[in-house]
Amino acid sequence: MIRLHVTSPLAPAAPVAPTLDQSRYLTQVMRLKAGDELLVFNGRDGEWRCTVAEVLKKGVILRAEEQVRSQTFGPDLELIVAVVKKARVETIVEKAAELGARRVRLVLTKRTNADRIRLDRLDAIAEEAAEQTGRMDVPAVDDPIKLDALLDGWETGRRLMFCDETGGAPAVSSLRDAGEGPWSILIGPEGGFSPEEGERLRSLPFTTAVSLGPRILRADTAAIAAMTLWQAAVGDWAR
């Protein structure tokens, strides 16, 4: 069944108004008509079975019928990635949504050299991935911020999985030793972190520096590998 993310509140018999693009998708691509059913979620009120109530010239109106799943959230995992080429950032955001990250944060490092970022495009990619994977929320994608500023304002109690291309401990055992709780994963730029950035990251008390193996990985591959290892070690895959 089609799944759609909306911003409207969801409650019994509540009207739901998809965006114009979503309405076109439902009627012109999926060929839905009045009375047809689909699943809808908004990240707050769970997942609902809805019916197409009206097909208008400029959009459709849905009606919420019943809640089929209560609201749940995945683990408190952020993916922090240095801005790289546009196509690779888009892949990273898509896979972050599929692998359960709650938030994607983009950072600027000393060796960042990348295309202009379109957050509206990244938000759309995250939304589509959430719809397809069955998750009940859509990960936020933040504006790029300098790495030093990010570390200066670090959230108390959150641990950092630093994927260190110069060498680190085995990932799974190190993560399990550090334990569960709020985590962030940091992936560097194509040229790697500068020596000064690496030194600062390794010195932080909340950092767990890990290796992603003996080969040099592109940023998108590294992000997927790191999230997979984290999920298997301390994420909801382990449970």
Image (cartoon, rainbow, N blue to C red):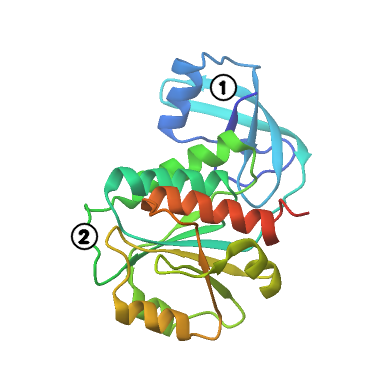
Q: Picture coordinates of residue 155 (x, y %)?
A: 54, 79
| Quadrant assignment, res 148 | bottom left
- The residue positioned farthest toward the front in the image shown: 214
SS at badge 2: loop
The residue carrying mark 1 is: 54
Question: Which of the numbered marks, if any, corresponds to residue 84?
Answer: none
The residue carrying mark 2 is: 113
The quarter of the image holding the C terminus is bottom right
Closer-to-camera residue (36/131): 131
Which numbered disc, 1 or 2, marks the residue closer to the eye? Answer: 2
Closer-to-camera residue (235/74): 235
Residue at left offset 31%, top offset 42%: 87
Q: Is residue 3 left or right of residue 108?
A: right
Q: Amino acid at mark 2?
A: Asn
Residue 7 visible somewhere in the drawing: no
Q: With respect to residue 179, does 90 lie above or below? A: above
Q: Amino acid at mark 1?
A: Glu
Residue 163 visible somewhere in the drawing: yes
Q: Picture coordinates of residue 164 (x, y %)?
A: 44, 68
Q: Picture coordinates of residue 158 (x, y %)?
A: 59, 76
Q: Is residue 131 left or right of residue 196?
A: right
Residue at left offset 46%, top offset 43%: 94
Q: Picture coordinates of residue 28 (x, y %)?
A: 44, 16
SS at badge 1: strand
Closer-to-camera residue (139/170): 170
Residue at left offset 55%, top offset 29%: 61
Q: Is residue 204 left or right of residue 220?
A: right
CA neighbours of label 1 inside 10 A, class few (<14), some (14 to 19), many (20+): some
* Mark 1 / mark 2, whichever is N-terminal: 1
